[in-house]
Image (cartoon, helix red, strand yellow):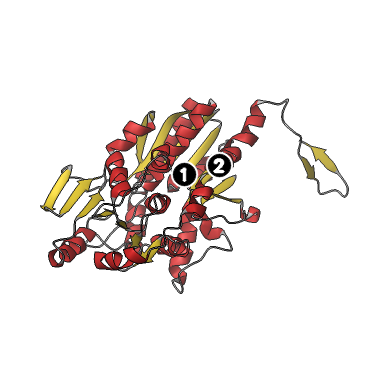
């Protein structure tokens, strides 16, 4: 079977999930000839993605957030206006996607939370199975814990998530823990898509803090904290466009340009991890038993949800700033009880591959296809299809 991926290029998580799924599909005889990445003009798609995805990558302009002058807080109203201003760019992106779909003729399209995926299905109605993968789809589950209040933010997050999944056949909701499926909303709860390189690591605990920031504005918080705590060693990764591979602030504080293998190496060896509450890296930290400090980006309600959900799953603690002293104080009390999480992750192949392969495989093998019975409007009338 032939799959096309549409991947949100914001941050690191969706890209590593796409790499992981591709690496699971190919040994089973399937192919991913093209990956479409929604790009942000202020960010660069990391080189590791091109190296690891090992297929043709087409980048297209995609809607994105606008931040304040400090590059820390998301401004929702300005983001909406900004994206409306570039609507013709996004329509051009949809034409590019249509051309790629026409040329490659995929059996399945999988969207890793990019708005263009849902908009493509809304405008063009392709007769191709459409699956969406992401932790965000868990927000439609009745057991998902939302932060108190924030009613407008919750509404906007749900609208955004629904747009990504317009006409989706299945929503594969990545989760920190096992939960029942919610078939009324087409939600299938599945484990995180961690890569093999994470699963084979043997964790150590060396004397430094590891971290990741999506928005460079938070670098100032880290610098201010480090001035008061110069003896504590910290290594932070960022995707600052013009940054060098390593930016040496102090012998005990270094900023690294995002490099996936290097990032995992530091994750494996650190004694604690601090980040802006992205789902994927928290899962990696949980798998390796690392205490986590989560600082949701200001105005980013989705990350507030991530932080609360991860905290309830035993990942660590939450804060409003990069005060790493909180993490240092928490580390001795962290309960490294990740056995249950590891058992959940072991089910990834079984659950995810069965959901995105089995039914479509039947379409290509009519002998194995079992007829489905659907009730018609006329009483006691049935039809085999």
* Whether residue 105 can be seen here: no
Name the element at disc 1. loop
Q: Which mark is residue 352?
A: 2
Instruction: Please indicate whether residue 227 sits to the left or right of residue 210 in the image.
Output: left
Which residue lies at the image location 63% right of the left edge and 30% below the top edge? 361
Quick one: 294 or 4, which is closer to the camera?
A: 294
Q: Residues within 10 Å of mark 1 (few under 14, many from 20)?
A: many
Quick one: 226 or 128, which is closer to the camera?
A: 226
Badge 1 or badge 2: first in the primary sequence: 1
Question: In the rendered image, which quarter contains the C terminus?
Answer: top right
- Circle 1 residue: 193
Residues at discs 1 and 2 in contact (Cβ within 8 Å): yes
Q: Residues within 10 Å of mark 2 (few under 14, many from 20)?
A: many
Which residue lies at the image location 12% right of the left edge and 50% below the top edge? 248
Name the element at disc 2. helix
Residue 349 placement: quadrant: top right
Quick one: 220 or 383, which is closer to the camera?
A: 220
């Amino acid at each position: 079977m032939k799959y096309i991926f549409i991947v949100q290029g914001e941050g690191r998580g969706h890209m590593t999930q796409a790499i992981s799924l591709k690496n699971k599909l190919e040994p089973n005889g399937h192919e991913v000839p093209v990956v479409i990445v929604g790009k942000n003009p202020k960010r660069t798609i990391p080189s590791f993605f091109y190296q690891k995805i090992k297929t043709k990558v087409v980048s297209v302009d995609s809607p994105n957030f606008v931040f304040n002058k400090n590059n820390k807080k998301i401004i929702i109203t300005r983001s909406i206006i900004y994206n409306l201003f570039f609507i013709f760019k996004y329509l051009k992106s949809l034409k590019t996607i249509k051309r790629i779909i026409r040329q490659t003729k995929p059996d399945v399209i999988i969207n890793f939370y990019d708005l263009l995926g849902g908009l493509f299905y809304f405008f063009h109605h392709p007769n191709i199975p459409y699956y969406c993968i992401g932790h965000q789809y868990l927000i439609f589950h009745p057991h998902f814990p939302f932060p108190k209040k924030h009613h407008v933010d919750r509404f906007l997050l749900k609208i955004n998530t629904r747009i990504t999944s317009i006409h989706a056949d299945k929503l594969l909701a990545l989760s920190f823990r096992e939960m029942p499926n919610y078939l009324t909303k087409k939600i299938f709860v599945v484990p995180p898509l961690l890569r093999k390189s994470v699963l084979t690591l043997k964790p150590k605990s060396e004397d430094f803090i590891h971290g990741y920031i999506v928005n460079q504005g938070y670098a100032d918080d880290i610098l201010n904290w480090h001035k008061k705590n110069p003896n504590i060693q910290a290594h932070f990764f960022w995707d600052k466009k013009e940054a060098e591979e390593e930016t040496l602030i102090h012998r005990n504080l270094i900023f690294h340009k995002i490099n996936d293998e290097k990032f995992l190496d530091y994750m494996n060896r650190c004694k604690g991890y601090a980040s802006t509450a992205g789902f994927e890296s928290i899962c990696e930290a949980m798998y390796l038993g690392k205490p986590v400090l989560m600082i949701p980006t200001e105005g980013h309600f989705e990350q507030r949800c991530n932080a609360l959900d991860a905290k309830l799953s035993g990942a660590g603690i939450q804060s409003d700033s990069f005060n790493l002293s909180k993490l240092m104080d928490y580390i001795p009390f962290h309960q490294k009880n990740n056995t249950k999480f590891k058992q959940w992750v072991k089910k990834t192949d079984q659950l995810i591959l069965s959901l995105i392969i089995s039914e479509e495989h039947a379409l290509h093998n009519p002998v194995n296809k079992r007829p489905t019975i659907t009730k018609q409007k006329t009483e006691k009338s049935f039809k085999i299809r």
